[in-house]
Image (cartoon, helix red, strand yellow):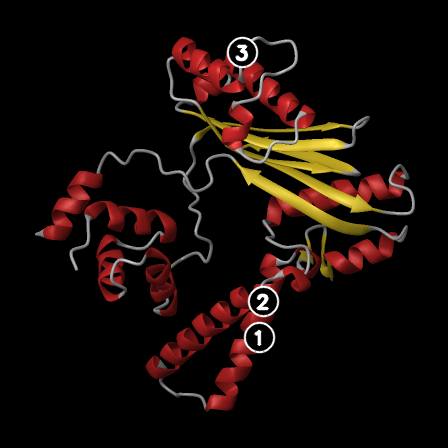
Amino acid sequence: MAISAQAVKQLKELTNCGMMDCKRALEETNGDVDAAIKYLREKGLAKAAKKSGRIAAEGLVYTKVDEAKKVGVVVEINSETDFAAKSERFVEFVELVANTIIDNDVADVEALKAITPAGCNETIGDILTERIATISENIQIRRFKRMTGDLFVYTHNGGGSIIGSMIKIEADDVNDDAVKTCAKDLLLQITASSPLFVSQDEVPASVIEEEKEVQLKLVMKENEEAAKPKPQNVLEKIVEGRMRKYAEDICLLNQPYVKDPNLTVAKYIASVGKNIKVVEFVRFEKGEGIQKKEENFADEVASMIK
């Protein structure tokens, strides 16, 4: 089937692979993007397992907890330029959206846009339209996560990156200083190490099986190219080791603790005591998975089709 340049561009954004490799992967998988990502990983070409890119877009990630209501939110709102994201009217809008999410248990962005915030006569959607007109940039409420319970938040703003993290914990006394310190350390861990799940129990079997299949094919390919091929039982051991590393990468409790790599996060929590349990967490990074305009994309496509 014919593969469009846009489909190749999308796969390139998701995997950081070369244009020709992406085109070939889509041809081999009949244009199925998910299958193409898997194909590239099995070939050892894809540089990332996640389907989100690392290219930044502008805007803000904002975190807030209403301790009286025990409700918290992490929200990402994007703009075209960093200049607009720092403007008073943009920041004011972000804060309004966050407060509205705290006050209203809405399911998604579209439902949020239909809400009229307290003290306002217009809906969030109407206010958004007004801000787009006055700021003169495209502004999008991209995503949010609302949580309830004993919550702690952290916002990292440095090196052009804005990351907002929120964690829900249970403990003997969440107001204990040791518990608060632990929560702060866990937020730093989440922000720095990007886990996807709290523990291995939460990882869907389909995710594990797909990763195991990818690693087995990758190991077999490496073995075929090796000067001294290894026997099958050794290859299986290698895959087991990689799967353990995979669990460390994606599960918070399995990760090496950033302040003491000799400990896992689970062991660090246990050392604090107080019966601390991580219930859930969320981590948003500004612009994660959003592709800015590539000035040289046309030239790259032209060279690909010659």
Q: Nearer the viewer, residue 107 or 201?
A: 107
Helix, strand or loop at label 2? It is helix
Residue picked out by circle 3: 122
Mark 1 vs 3, N-terminal side? 3
Position above or below: 302 against 246? above
Q: Nearer the viewer, residue 250 or 119?
A: 119
Helix, strand or loop at label 1? It is helix
Q: Position of residue 259 (x, y in %)?
A: 72, 50
Q: Amino acid at mark 2?
A: Lys
Residue picked out by circle 2: 245
Q: Of circles 3 and 2, which is in front?
A: 3
Q: Amino acid at mark 1?
A: Gly
Task: State yes or no: discs 1 and 2 in contact (Cβ < 8 Å).
Answer: yes
Residue picked out by circle 1: 241
Helix, strand or loop at label 3? It is loop
Instruction: Describe residue 85's horizontal placement relative to residue 178 as left or right.
Output: left
- Judge the density around disc 3: few (<14), some (14-19), many (≥20) Cα neighbours within 10 Å: some
Instruction: Describe residue 104's horizontal placement relative to residue 179 as left or right.
Output: left
The quarter of the picture where the N terminus appears is bottom left
